[in-house]
Image (cartoon, grey):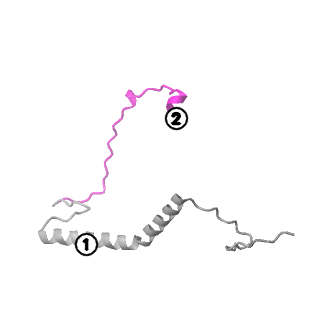
Amino acid sequence: MEPQVESSVSVPSGLPEDPPLSKNALKRALKRKRWEETKDDRKALKKAKLKEKKEKSKLAGEAQNRRKVVVEGQEESGIKVVVDCSFDHLMTDKVCPLWVCH
């Protein structure tokens, strides 16, 4: 009868054991983990820089970026205009070869 060798890592029954990762895969996983851990710090730093930039431009008297330009004396009428640049007369009904379409 052969002696049984116990492994130092116990795997719960029913769960497959993960294959060992290569050195590069371990490096990528570690790098991804560090990136996720510092995500909140980077976000806060970016937000602080943006706030500082806005304050500087406000103190310098520069115009703030506005989303909508309002023109004096102009009212919104609710009318929308669509311009149709029709080029149908310049189009041809050629069937393209199969190798060109893919």
User: Percent position (x, y) of residue 90?
Assistant: 38, 27
Q: Residue at x 39, y 31 (%)?
A: 88
Q: Is residue 80 shown in magenta?
A: yes
Residue drawn at 64 percent across, 64 percent down: 18
Quadrant including the N terminus: bottom right
26, 2: nearer the viewer: 2
Q: Residues within 10 Å of mark 1 (few under 14, many from 20)?
A: few
Q: In x, y percent, where is residue 43?
A: 36, 70
Q: How many marks?
A: 2
Coordinates of residue 62 in the picture (x, y in percent): 14, 65
Residue stretch in magenta: 73-102
Q: Quadrant of residue 70?
A: bottom left
Outermost residue on the left side: it is 61
Q: Nearer the viewer, residue 33 or 79?
A: 33
Residue tagged 1: 51
User: Please, what is the three-letter code of the amino acid marked with disc 1?
Assistant: Lys
Numbered tag placed on residue 38 in the rendering: none
Residue on which disc 2 sits: 102
| N-term-proximal mark, 1 vs 2 | 1
Q: Residue at x 26, y 59 (%)?
A: 76
1 and 2 marks in contact (CB < 8 Å): no
Mark 2 secondary-structure assignment = loop
- Looking at the image, residue 1 sits to the left or right of residue 11; the answer is right
Residue ID at (16%, 64%) = 63
Q: Nearer the viewer, residue 8 or 15?
A: 8
Where 84 sits versus 49, above or below?
above
Q: Considering the numbered disc 1 on the image, is that residue within a helix, a strand or a loop?
A: helix
- Where, by quadrant of the figure, is residue 21 drawn? bottom right
Q: Main secondary structure of the magenta part?
A: loop
Residue 41 is left or right of residue 18, and the answer is left
Identity, as a three-letter code, of the amino acid under mark 2? His
